Amino acid sequence: MSFNTSDIPVGVVGLGLMGCSITTCLLMAGHPVVAIAPIEDDLKHAQKRITNHLQHSLEQGLVDHEPDFFLKNLQISMDYSALKNCRLVIECTIENEEIKKSVYEKIEKEIADDAFLVSNTSAIPISILQKLTKHPERFFGLHWAEPSHTTRFLEIICGELSDVKRGEELYELSHKWGKEPTLVRKDIRGFITNRLMYAMYREAFYLVENGYATIEDIDRACINNAGYWMTLLGVFGWMDLTGVQAYHNVMKELFPTLSNSKEVPKLIDDIVKEGGRGVTNGKGFYNYTPEQAKEIEEIFTEFSFDIRNLAMKYNKKMNR
Ligand SMILES: NC(=O)c1ccc[n+]([C@@H]2O[C@H](COP(=O)([O-])OP(=O)(O)OC[C@H]3O[C@@H](n4cnc5c(N)ncnc54)[C@H](O)[C@@H]3O)[C@@H](O)[C@H]2O)c1
Protein backbone atom coordinates (compact mmCIF):
# COMPACT_ATOMS: atom_id res chain seq x y z
CA MET A 1 0.00 0.00 0.00
CA SER A 2 1.48 3.37 -0.94
CA PHE A 3 0.46 6.46 1.01
CA ASN A 4 1.93 9.44 2.77
CA THR A 5 1.24 9.93 6.45
CA SER A 6 1.22 13.69 5.81
CA ASP A 7 -2.02 13.14 3.84
CA ILE A 8 -3.71 11.34 6.75
CA PRO A 9 -4.87 13.62 9.58
CA VAL A 10 -5.21 11.74 12.84
CA GLY A 11 -7.09 12.74 15.99
CA VAL A 12 -6.17 11.83 19.57
CA VAL A 13 -8.83 12.39 22.22
CA GLY A 14 -7.59 12.47 25.82
CA LEU A 15 -4.18 13.98 26.58
CA GLY A 16 -3.06 12.16 29.71
CA LEU A 17 0.02 9.98 29.97
CA MET A 18 -0.69 7.89 26.88
CA GLY A 19 -2.51 10.47 24.76
CA CYS A 20 0.62 12.65 24.86
CA SER A 21 3.05 9.88 23.91
CA ILE A 22 0.72 8.58 21.16
CA THR A 23 0.46 12.13 19.78
CA THR A 24 4.27 12.32 19.82
CA CYS A 25 4.56 9.04 17.91
CA LEU A 26 2.09 10.17 15.24
CA LEU A 27 3.82 13.54 14.81
CA MET A 28 7.20 11.82 14.42
CA ALA A 29 5.63 9.56 11.77
CA GLY A 30 4.59 12.66 9.80
CA HIS A 31 0.84 12.86 10.45
CA PRO A 32 -0.99 16.12 11.01
CA VAL A 33 -2.46 15.58 14.50
CA VAL A 34 -5.53 17.12 16.11
CA ALA A 35 -5.25 16.51 19.85
CA ILE A 36 -8.46 17.01 21.80
CA ALA A 37 -8.37 17.88 25.49
CA PRO A 38 -11.66 16.67 26.99
CA ILE A 39 -10.81 18.32 30.34
CA GLU A 40 -9.07 21.64 31.08
CA ASP A 41 -6.39 19.92 33.11
CA ASP A 42 -4.99 18.40 29.91
CA LEU A 43 -4.28 21.88 28.54
CA LYS A 44 -1.91 22.59 31.42
CA HIS A 45 0.57 19.87 30.58
CA ALA A 46 -0.05 18.40 27.08
CA GLN A 47 2.04 20.78 24.96
CA LYS A 48 4.93 20.62 27.45
CA ARG A 49 4.86 16.83 27.71
CA ILE A 50 4.76 16.35 23.94
CA THR A 51 7.59 18.87 23.46
CA ASN A 52 9.69 17.03 26.07
CA HIS A 53 9.06 13.69 24.33
CA LEU A 54 10.12 15.22 21.01
CA GLN A 55 13.23 16.76 22.57
CA HIS A 56 14.28 13.42 24.13
CA SER A 57 13.64 11.68 20.82
CA LEU A 58 15.95 14.16 19.09
CA GLU A 59 18.66 13.71 21.74
CA GLN A 60 18.39 9.92 21.42
CA GLY A 61 18.61 10.02 17.61
CA LEU A 62 15.07 8.76 16.99
CA VAL A 63 14.37 11.84 14.85
CA ASP A 64 16.52 14.43 13.06
CA HIS A 65 14.45 17.54 13.63
CA GLU A 66 13.87 19.97 16.50
CA PRO A 67 10.48 19.75 18.29
CA ASP A 68 9.17 22.84 16.45
CA PHE A 69 9.41 21.00 13.13
CA PHE A 70 6.81 18.49 14.37
CA LEU A 71 4.77 20.87 16.51
CA LYS A 72 3.79 22.79 13.35
CA ASN A 73 1.58 19.77 12.56
CA LEU A 74 -0.11 19.73 15.95
CA GLN A 75 -3.36 21.42 16.87
CA ILE A 76 -4.47 21.14 20.51
CA SER A 77 -8.09 22.07 21.16
CA MET A 78 -11.06 21.43 23.42
CA ASP A 79 -13.37 21.73 20.40
CA TYR A 80 -14.30 18.34 18.90
CA SER A 81 -15.22 19.95 15.55
CA ALA A 82 -11.45 20.22 14.88
CA LEU A 83 -11.60 16.43 14.24
CA LYS A 84 -13.75 16.88 11.12
CA ASN A 85 -11.12 15.85 8.53
CA CYS A 86 -9.45 13.11 10.57
CA ARG A 87 -9.32 9.68 8.94
CA LEU A 88 -8.49 8.01 12.24
CA VAL A 89 -9.41 9.08 15.77
CA ILE A 90 -7.75 7.43 18.76
CA GLU A 91 -9.70 7.65 22.01
CA CYS A 92 -7.37 7.69 24.97
CA THR A 93 -9.51 8.67 27.97
CA ILE A 94 -9.72 7.03 31.38
CA GLU A 95 -10.88 3.44 31.64
CA ASN A 96 -14.59 4.20 32.19
CA GLU A 97 -17.31 3.04 29.81
CA GLU A 98 -19.68 5.94 30.49
CA ILE A 99 -16.98 8.52 29.79
CA LYS A 100 -15.81 6.68 26.69
CA LYS A 101 -19.43 6.52 25.42
CA SER A 102 -19.95 10.26 25.81
CA VAL A 103 -16.65 10.90 24.04
CA TYR A 104 -17.64 8.60 21.11
CA GLU A 105 -20.89 10.54 20.66
CA LYS A 106 -18.94 13.79 20.39
CA ILE A 107 -16.40 12.28 17.97
CA GLU A 108 -18.97 10.60 15.73
CA LYS A 109 -20.86 13.88 15.33
CA GLU A 110 -17.79 15.24 13.57
CA ILE A 111 -15.98 12.51 11.60
CA ALA A 112 -16.84 10.88 8.26
CA ASP A 113 -18.81 7.62 8.42
CA ASP A 114 -15.86 5.65 7.01
CA ALA A 115 -13.14 7.18 9.22
CA PHE A 116 -11.62 4.85 11.83
CA LEU A 117 -12.59 5.27 15.48
CA VAL A 118 -10.37 3.27 17.84
CA SER A 119 -9.75 2.97 21.57
CA ASN A 120 -6.55 2.54 23.54
CA THR A 121 -8.45 0.68 26.28
CA SER A 122 -6.30 -1.73 28.26
CA ALA A 123 -9.01 -4.12 29.26
CA ILE A 124 -12.58 -3.27 28.19
CA PRO A 125 -13.58 -5.74 25.46
CA ILE A 126 -13.78 -4.10 22.03
CA SER A 127 -17.06 -5.94 21.35
CA ILE A 128 -18.59 -3.98 24.26
CA LEU A 129 -17.12 -0.58 23.35
CA GLN A 130 -18.02 -0.82 19.67
CA LYS A 131 -21.69 -1.26 20.55
CA LEU A 132 -21.58 2.22 22.05
CA THR A 133 -20.89 3.66 18.58
CA LYS A 134 -22.97 4.32 15.45
CA HIS A 135 -20.61 2.46 13.13
CA PRO A 136 -19.20 -0.56 14.98
CA GLU A 137 -17.65 -1.98 11.81
CA ARG A 138 -15.01 0.80 11.78
CA PHE A 139 -14.25 0.46 15.48
CA PHE A 140 -11.10 -1.33 16.75
CA GLY A 141 -8.87 -1.54 19.78
CA LEU A 142 -5.47 0.05 19.25
CA HIS A 143 -3.51 -0.95 22.33
CA TRP A 144 -0.19 0.88 22.76
CA ALA A 145 2.58 0.45 25.30
CA GLU A 146 3.93 3.44 27.19
CA PRO A 147 6.02 5.37 26.13
CA SER A 148 4.24 5.01 22.79
CA HIS A 149 6.83 6.96 20.81
CA THR A 150 9.66 4.53 21.69
CA THR A 151 7.96 1.12 22.06
CA ARG A 152 7.38 -1.04 19.02
CA PHE A 153 4.44 -2.87 20.60
CA LEU A 154 0.94 -2.41 19.19
CA GLU A 155 -2.10 -4.67 19.36
CA ILE A 156 -4.87 -4.03 16.83
CA ILE A 157 -7.96 -5.75 18.15
CA CYS A 158 -11.10 -6.61 16.20
CA GLY A 159 -14.40 -6.73 18.03
CA GLU A 160 -17.26 -9.07 17.00
CA LEU A 161 -18.62 -6.41 14.63
CA SER A 162 -15.35 -5.02 13.28
CA ASP A 163 -14.56 -5.34 9.58
CA VAL A 164 -11.36 -7.43 9.68
CA LYS A 165 -10.33 -6.10 6.23
CA ARG A 166 -10.24 -2.59 7.71
CA GLY A 167 -8.24 -3.95 10.63
CA GLU A 168 -5.68 -5.04 8.05
CA GLU A 169 -5.53 -1.42 6.80
CA LEU A 170 -4.67 -0.26 10.32
CA TYR A 171 -2.06 -3.02 10.51
CA GLU A 172 -0.39 -1.66 7.33
CA LEU A 173 -0.57 1.94 8.51
CA SER A 174 0.94 1.22 11.91
CA HIS A 175 4.21 0.09 10.30
CA LYS A 176 4.69 3.77 9.39
CA TRP A 177 4.65 4.53 13.13
CA GLY A 178 7.65 2.27 13.77
CA LYS A 179 5.46 -0.48 15.24
CA GLU A 180 5.64 -4.25 14.92
CA PRO A 181 1.92 -4.79 15.32
CA THR A 182 -0.14 -7.85 16.17
CA LEU A 183 -3.60 -8.11 14.62
CA VAL A 184 -5.92 -9.81 17.14
CA ARG A 185 -8.61 -11.10 14.80
CA LYS A 186 -11.00 -12.28 17.52
CA ASP A 187 -11.82 -10.27 20.61
CA ILE A 188 -10.72 -11.60 23.99
CA ARG A 189 -10.71 -9.76 27.35
CA GLY A 190 -7.22 -8.41 28.11
CA PHE A 191 -6.12 -9.08 24.50
CA ILE A 192 -2.74 -10.85 24.38
CA THR A 193 -0.18 -9.12 26.55
CA ASN A 194 -2.50 -8.22 29.42
CA ARG A 195 -3.63 -11.84 29.67
CA LEU A 196 0.01 -12.90 29.91
CA MET A 197 0.97 -10.15 32.34
CA TYR A 198 -2.03 -10.53 34.64
CA ALA A 199 -1.36 -14.26 34.97
CA MET A 200 2.08 -13.26 36.24
CA TYR A 201 0.75 -10.48 38.53
CA ARG A 202 -1.70 -12.93 40.12
CA GLU A 203 1.05 -15.40 40.88
CA ALA A 204 3.28 -12.61 42.28
CA PHE A 205 0.52 -11.61 44.74
CA TYR A 206 -0.01 -15.26 45.68
CA LEU A 207 3.69 -15.66 46.56
CA VAL A 208 3.80 -12.47 48.67
CA GLU A 209 0.46 -12.96 50.42
CA ASN A 210 1.36 -16.52 51.35
CA GLY A 211 4.79 -15.60 52.73
CA TYR A 212 6.98 -17.31 50.11
CA ALA A 213 8.93 -14.15 49.23
CA THR A 214 8.89 -10.39 49.69
CA ILE A 215 7.85 -7.82 47.08
CA GLU A 216 11.52 -6.82 46.68
CA ASP A 217 12.64 -10.43 46.15
CA ILE A 218 9.97 -11.10 43.56
CA ASP A 219 10.82 -7.97 41.60
CA ARG A 220 14.52 -8.85 41.71
CA ALA A 221 13.88 -12.40 40.52
CA CYS A 222 11.70 -11.18 37.68
CA ILE A 223 14.18 -8.50 36.56
CA ASN A 224 17.13 -10.92 36.59
CA ASN A 225 15.34 -13.89 35.03
CA ALA A 226 12.58 -12.96 32.56
CA GLY A 227 14.11 -9.49 32.20
CA TYR A 228 17.18 -11.01 30.55
CA TRP A 229 15.50 -13.04 27.81
CA MET A 230 12.01 -11.76 27.18
CA THR A 231 13.05 -8.82 25.01
CA LEU A 232 14.90 -11.15 22.64
CA LEU A 233 12.87 -14.35 22.52
CA GLY A 234 9.33 -13.99 23.84
CA VAL A 235 7.64 -16.97 25.49
CA PHE A 236 7.75 -19.73 22.90
CA GLY A 237 11.18 -18.80 21.51
CA TRP A 238 12.54 -19.10 25.07
CA MET A 239 11.07 -22.58 25.58
CA ASP A 240 12.58 -23.67 22.27
CA LEU A 241 16.02 -22.37 23.24
CA THR A 242 16.03 -24.01 26.64
CA GLY A 243 14.41 -27.35 25.81
CA VAL A 244 10.74 -28.02 25.16
CA GLN A 245 10.74 -31.42 26.88
CA ALA A 246 11.72 -29.93 30.24
CA TYR A 247 8.78 -27.51 30.14
CA HIS A 248 6.45 -30.37 29.31
CA ASN A 249 7.63 -32.26 32.40
CA VAL A 250 7.39 -29.26 34.73
CA MET A 251 3.91 -28.26 33.55
CA LYS A 252 2.41 -31.55 34.69
CA GLU A 253 3.53 -30.98 38.28
CA LEU A 254 3.54 -27.19 38.53
CA PHE A 255 0.27 -26.10 36.88
CA PRO A 256 -1.98 -27.63 39.55
CA THR A 257 -0.13 -25.60 42.22
CA LEU A 258 -0.36 -22.16 40.55
CA SER A 259 -2.83 -19.60 41.84
CA ASN A 260 -6.19 -19.55 40.07
CA SER A 261 -7.75 -17.02 42.42
CA LYS A 262 -10.64 -15.01 40.99
CA GLU A 263 -10.43 -12.26 43.65
CA VAL A 264 -8.58 -8.94 43.50
CA PRO A 265 -5.65 -9.51 45.93
CA LYS A 266 -6.01 -7.88 49.37
CA LEU A 267 -2.54 -6.34 49.08
CA ILE A 268 -3.45 -4.14 46.12
CA ASP A 269 -6.99 -3.59 47.39
CA ASP A 270 -5.70 -2.08 50.64
CA ILE A 271 -3.26 0.22 48.84
CA VAL A 272 -5.93 1.50 46.45
CA LYS A 273 -8.47 2.02 49.25
CA GLU A 274 -5.89 4.13 51.10
CA GLY A 275 -5.45 6.32 47.99
CA GLY A 276 -2.16 4.83 46.76
CA ARG A 277 -1.51 5.47 43.07
CA GLY A 278 2.10 4.37 42.80
CA VAL A 279 4.90 6.64 41.61
CA THR A 280 2.36 9.39 40.77
CA ASN A 281 1.69 10.14 44.44
CA GLY A 282 4.56 8.28 46.06
CA LYS A 283 2.40 5.52 47.57
CA GLY A 284 2.34 2.07 46.05
CA PHE A 285 3.99 -1.28 46.76
CA TYR A 286 7.00 0.87 47.59
CA ASN A 287 7.04 4.46 48.89
CA TYR A 288 8.73 7.24 46.93
CA THR A 289 9.81 10.76 47.88
CA PRO A 290 9.03 13.36 45.17
CA GLU A 291 12.76 13.32 44.23
CA GLN A 292 12.79 9.53 43.92
CA ALA A 293 9.61 9.62 41.83
CA LYS A 294 11.14 12.15 39.44
CA GLU A 295 14.35 10.14 39.23
CA ILE A 296 12.50 6.90 38.40
CA GLU A 297 10.58 8.59 35.62
CA GLU A 298 13.79 10.00 34.16
CA ILE A 299 15.64 6.69 34.41
CA PHE A 300 12.70 4.88 32.80
CA THR A 301 12.72 7.36 29.90
CA GLU A 302 16.45 6.77 29.33
CA PHE A 303 16.06 3.01 29.67
CA SER A 304 13.19 2.85 27.18
CA PHE A 305 15.40 4.37 24.46
CA ASP A 306 18.32 2.05 25.31
CA ILE A 307 16.25 -1.13 25.34
CA ARG A 308 14.65 -0.15 22.07
CA ASN A 309 18.11 0.19 20.48
CA LEU A 310 19.30 -3.08 21.99
CA ALA A 311 16.17 -4.94 20.84
CA MET A 312 16.48 -3.55 17.33
CA LYS A 313 20.16 -4.49 17.10
CA TYR A 314 19.48 -8.11 18.10
CA ASN A 315 16.26 -8.42 16.12
CA LYS A 316 18.33 -7.65 13.04
CA LYS A 317 20.75 -10.46 13.97
CA MET A 318 17.76 -12.79 14.39
CA ASN A 319 16.53 -11.71 10.91
CA ARG A 320 13.29 -10.30 12.32
N1 LIG B 1 -0.94 3.93 31.27
C1 LIG B 1 -0.64 2.91 30.50
O1 LIG B 1 0.48 2.37 30.52
C2 LIG B 1 -1.67 2.36 29.51
C3 LIG B 1 -1.29 1.35 28.62
C4 LIG B 1 -2.20 0.91 27.66
C5 LIG B 1 -3.48 1.45 27.63
N2 LIG B 1 -3.86 2.43 28.52
C6 LIG B 1 -5.22 2.97 28.41
O2 LIG B 1 -5.17 4.28 27.86
C7 LIG B 1 -6.26 5.05 28.35
C8 LIG B 1 -5.72 6.32 28.99
O3 LIG B 1 -4.79 5.97 30.00
P1 LIG B 1 -3.70 6.99 30.57
O4 LIG B 1 -2.69 6.16 31.27
O5 LIG B 1 -3.27 7.94 29.50
O6 LIG B 1 -4.58 7.78 31.65
P2 LIG B 1 -4.39 9.23 32.30
O7 LIG B 1 -5.05 9.15 33.63
O8 LIG B 1 -2.99 9.69 32.22
O9 LIG B 1 -5.27 10.16 31.35
C9 LIG B 1 -6.63 10.02 31.27
C10 LIG B 1 -7.23 11.10 30.38
O10 LIG B 1 -8.63 10.83 30.31
C11 LIG B 1 -9.29 12.03 30.02
N3 LIG B 1 -10.39 12.24 30.98
C12 LIG B 1 -10.33 12.24 32.33
N4 LIG B 1 -11.56 12.50 32.84
C13 LIG B 1 -12.39 12.68 31.79
C14 LIG B 1 -13.77 12.98 31.66
N5 LIG B 1 -14.54 13.16 32.72
N6 LIG B 1 -14.28 13.08 30.40
C15 LIG B 1 -13.53 12.90 29.31
N7 LIG B 1 -12.21 12.61 29.37
C16 LIG B 1 -11.65 12.51 30.58
C17 LIG B 1 -8.27 13.15 30.15
O11 LIG B 1 -7.86 13.49 28.86
C18 LIG B 1 -7.14 12.52 30.92
O12 LIG B 1 -5.92 13.15 30.67
C19 LIG B 1 -7.03 4.15 29.32
O13 LIG B 1 -8.10 3.53 28.64
C20 LIG B 1 -5.97 3.12 29.73
O14 LIG B 1 -6.54 1.91 30.14
C21 LIG B 1 -2.97 2.90 29.45
Image (cartoon, rainbow, N blue to C red):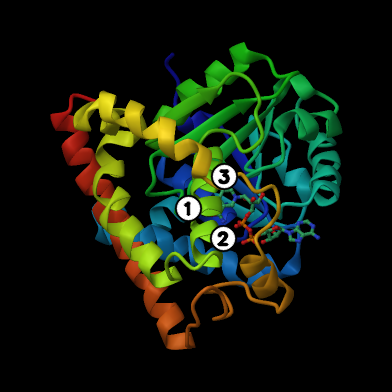
The answer to whether 75 is drawn above or below residue 2 in the figure is below
Q: Quadrant of ligand 1?
A: bottom right
The residue carrying mark 2 has its beta carbon less than 8 Å from ligand 1? yes
| Disc 2 crowd, CA 10 A, few/some/many (<14, 14-19, 20+) | some
Is residue 146 something that shows in the picture? yes
Q: Residue 25, percent across and down? A: 45, 46
Q: What residue is shown with label 3?
A: 33
Q: What residue is shown with label 1?
A: 146
Determine the CA span between mark 2 and mark 3: 17 Å
Question: Is the C-beta separation of discs 1 and 2 under 8 Å?
Answer: yes
Left or right: residue 79 versus residue 158 is right
Marked residue nearer the N-terminal end (2 or 3): 2
Q: Nearer the viewer, mark 3 or mark 1?
A: 1
Question: Is the C-beta separation of discs 2 and 3 under 8 Å?
Answer: no
Determine the CA span between mark 1 and mark 2: 8 Å
Q: Residue flagged by tag 3: what amino acid is it?
A: Val
Q: Nearer the viewer, mark 2 or mark 3?
A: 2
Q: What residue is shown with label 2?
A: 17
| Disc 3 crowd, CA 10 A, few/some/many (<14, 14-19, 20+) | many
The residue carrying mark 1 has its beta carbon less than 8 Å from ligand 1? yes
Looking at the image, which residue is at 52% across and 23% down?
183
Looking at the image, which residue is at 37% across and 36% down?
178
Q: Residue 271, percent across and down? A: 65, 74
Determine the CA span between mark 3 and mark 1: 19 Å
